[in-house]
Amino acid sequence: MQERIVVAKFGGTSVADAGQFRKIRAIVQSDPERRYIVVSAPGKRFSDDRKVTDLLLDCYEKAAAGASFEDELAQIRARYQAIIDGLGLQFPLDQELETLAQSLKNEPARDYCASRGEYLTAKIMADYLGFTFVDPAWCVCFDEDGQLNAEMTARTMRASLLPLKYAVIAGFYGADMKGQIRTFERGGSDITGSLAACAVNAALYENWTDVSGLYAADPRIVKDPETVAYMSYRELRTLSYMGASVLHSDAVLSASEMEIPINIRNTNRPEDAGTMVVRHLPPKVVKSPVTGVSGRRGMSVIQIEKVMVSDGSGFSAKVLDILKERQLPFEYCLTGIDAITLVIRSGLLDSCKEDLLVEIQATLHPDFVSVRDHLSLIAVTGEKGTESSDANVRVLERLTDEGIEISTINQGAGKLNLLVGVPEERYEDAIKAIYGIRSEITH
Ligand code: ASP
């Protein structure tokens, strides 16, 4: 039987300075099962600080425009030098940065440049922990079109990691078949962590950040919201999609496919248990039917009215075809008896709104079309929320009591989410009101 392996990923704020590196060492050394450590590039140390990845991207932009990038490179050098000196390490930083500077001068490549933050951080961390450095250029495999080759990555990562007892892997990037460095989207070190956990069939994927788990509501809106102790992968994906930015949603997907539990932990408070993300709740764990409430501002609703749209003539399909042709994604589409409702992000709709309405008129000859902007979409999420309790009723009642207009409602058959549209200016009131009844709603 394979021994228990934990993969631990540390985010940007967790590697922001030498003090944070020390905290990581204490965490890693406290559990010998933490064998594979994945790191981001140093993030912000204070609110108007700059992330190293942003500085690197500035270097690239300047180099690509033929301008000097010396200032930005000097700031990057200072960030790393302070970490190296603070930890008392001997690390060939000048040599590494010279390689980067040469490549920027000769042939600037965006992904290569952006990836150097994780590369340097992982090398320094490996040195500090006495672990082996693993460059994901060897084992995170991308296709020529820049898409991850998941199968090849799983095989190559497994073969690269398992022979090593302890290793540090740089997050955020890999390479294609030609050896060109390719990065994930921003925040993509989470994906590397998840891929590593899947490749070695880890018992646990720890994602260390600067909060003690996922809050049940946005702390910028609700004062001291509760941290959720347990949640399902589906709940986490929904909450992340709707704006709770703790973990990249693709990272959740791969871990959930292999049923590897994810534990969101706080590097600054390792004594906190954090949030555990699992497929099934352990027995005896009782949780509120409403796991969390999240939302997005900047939504528009298009209402297309036509008598008997659902009569089998394919009216709804034609509406969706129009959106597909325009590559215009929508949040949801509801078909009623005489109307179709589409919820679309205003930022995506704005540039094509007039054309789209003309096309809908010309192709579908509706009785009436209206567009309403300045709405927010709120997701009330709970795996068992709406089947075993009166949660939906309570939510709608409370919003009505607060005088908050409900402009759309969508529950669907899945029952994971209740989605409600409210006017943008009442968004925060609505989140507070729903969070307020969360603890009152029981099974
Ligand atoms: N360093 C990258 C970023 O700032 C990737 C990551 O931190 O996950 O987006």
Image (spheres, rainbow, N blue to C red):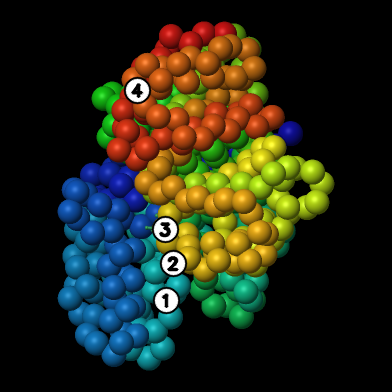
Q: Which mark is residue 351?
A: 2
**Badges 4 and 3: C-beta atoms under 8 Å apart?**
no
**Residue drawn at (61%, 46%) of the image:** 305
What is the spatial separation of the Cα atoms under label 2 and label 3, in whole angstroms?
8 Å
Residue appearing at x 69%, y 29% in the figure: 413
Q: Earlier in the sequence, mark 4 or mark 3?
A: 3
Residue 223 image-quadrant placement: top left
Q: Secondary structure at mark 4?
A: loop
In the rendered image, residue 284, in percent from the top left (x then y), is placed at 59, 9
**Residue 265 coordinates in the image, percent (x, y):** 41, 33
Tell me residue 102's x, y (percent): 34, 86
- Nearest-to-viewer mark from 4 and 2: 4
Q: Is residue 158 left or right of residue 246?
A: right
User: Which numbered dot is residue 8?
Assistant: none
Return the residue nearer the eye: 382 or 397: 397
Instruction: Specify which label sits upstream in the sequence, 3 or 1.
Output: 1
Question: CA gap, disc 3 to disc 1?
Answer: 26 Å
Disc 2 within 8 angstroms of ligand 1 (CB): no
Q: Which mark is residue 403?
A: 4
At label 2, which amino acid type do we have? Answer: Ser
Per the image, the residue denoted by label 3 is 347
Q: Are marks 2 and 1 in contact (CB under 8 Å)?
A: no
